[in-house]
Amino acid sequence: MTLTLEDVKNVRFPIAKRVGEGYRATEVDDFVDKVDVTFATMLEENERLQAQLEALDGSSAESDGDPDLRTENERLRAELEEARKQQSETVAAAAPAEDKDQAAELARLRDENADLRQQLEQARQSTGLTVMDGQGGGKVEKIVVATAAQASPAVTRLVQLATEQAESVVSEAESEAQRKLDEANRKAQELTLDAQTRAERTQSESRVNADQMTAAARAEAERLATEARTNSERVNLDAENRRRELFAQLEAERDELVGKVDRLRSFEDDYRSSMVQHFTAQLEAVKSGKLEPSGKPALLGEARATDKDHGGSQTPRLDALLAEGN
């Protein structure tokens, strides 16, 4: 799996659970492996473009000579030489001939001229050129022979026209071949230059992308490390402040409880002292006090005397209480 620049910019490494361990090693290793694969892919693409460039250079070198064009040029040159040879033979044979022989020779030359015209037309069709007969502005030149004396110049003119037409065809074929060759060379140079430009641009982009990915990854790693350190310091500071607040709160509660306990103990001591004093005073009052009220009734004394006389009392318990009071 290859990476893009957006993948590198948006990568986020999970932080380890324990504080101080940094990022997870497996996540960082996987990201580095992806970066290596992407860089290797770019290098392979660069090598492929360089191979295409070398192939284009070889094809342009091979296209300098077109075999078909060379064959066509050689054939046209051979036809030109054959026409010139026939011209020389015709001129040599037509001079000493008689009128009858000249007429026959003229007919033969006309046939040969027709054959040459047919061959010229075939040459035009084979080379893709449209050339008009003659040297003028596209007009067909006609030669009329009325007498035997005009036969020899007519033959010479026909051969000359055929030769000129053949040379024109050859020249135009060579020009067309050179034009096609120049165009092929130009296209080859354009393709070579374009391939070189694309290869250089791809290589430059690969280097820039690699540098950008490396810089982005390094910046992201530094940012995450800074955030981790900042978060760790903030958490430690918050924990320390919270611990101090809790200790201060506990100490305040302890002091308050100690004060309450001291007040309870003081109250207890005061209460105990008050109770002891009260009970002591009551005990002293009971010990020193006389429970029998003043103004003892006479009946009480008479009743006791009567009881003694009769040998008993009707209220022994009351007598016992009265005795305890006395």
Image: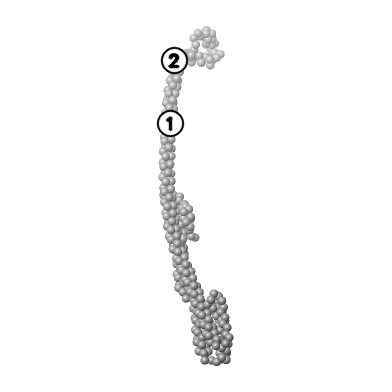
Q: Residue at x 43, y 41 (%)?
A: 238
Is tag 2's residue or tag 1's residue first in the polypeptide sequence? Answer: 1
- Measured as percent of width and height from the top left, residue 307 is found at 53, 11
Total numbered labels placed on residues in the image? 2
Q: Is residue 23 left or right of residue 115?
A: left
Q: Residue at x 56, y 84 (%)?
A: 113
Above or below residue 75? Residue 257 is: above
Q: Residue at x 45, y 62 (%)?
A: 201
* Any part of residue 44 in sight: no
Q: Secondary structure at mark 1?
A: helix
Q: Give 284 or 188, whichever is nearer the viewer.
A: 188
Q: Give 249 or 300, whichever is nearer the viewer.
A: 249
Q: Give 53 or 317, whichever is nearer the viewer.
A: 53
Disc 2: which residue: 288
Contact between labelled residues 1 and 2, with CB atoms less than 8 Å apart: no
Neighbourhood count class around disc 1 (C-alpha, 10 Å): few under 14, some 14–19, many 20 upward: few
Disc 1: which residue: 256
- Measured as percent of width and height from the top left, residue 60 is found at 46, 72
What colouring style does the render use?
one colour
Neighbourhood count class around disc 2 (C-alpha, 10 Å): few under 14, some 14–19, many 20 upward: few
Q: Give 193 or 119, whichever is nearer the viewer.
A: 119
- Measured as percent of width and height from the top left, residue 41 is found at 46, 63
Residue 204, picture quadrant: bottom left
Amino acid identity at mark 2: Ser
Q: Residue at x 55, y 92 (%)?
A: 98
Give the foreground label among 2 and 1: 1
Q: CA distance from mark 2 to mark 1?
A: 48 Å
Above or below residue 125? Residue 280 is: above
Q: Secondary structure at mark 2?
A: helix
Q: Is residue 170 left or right of residue 259?
A: right
Q: Which mark is residue 281?
A: none
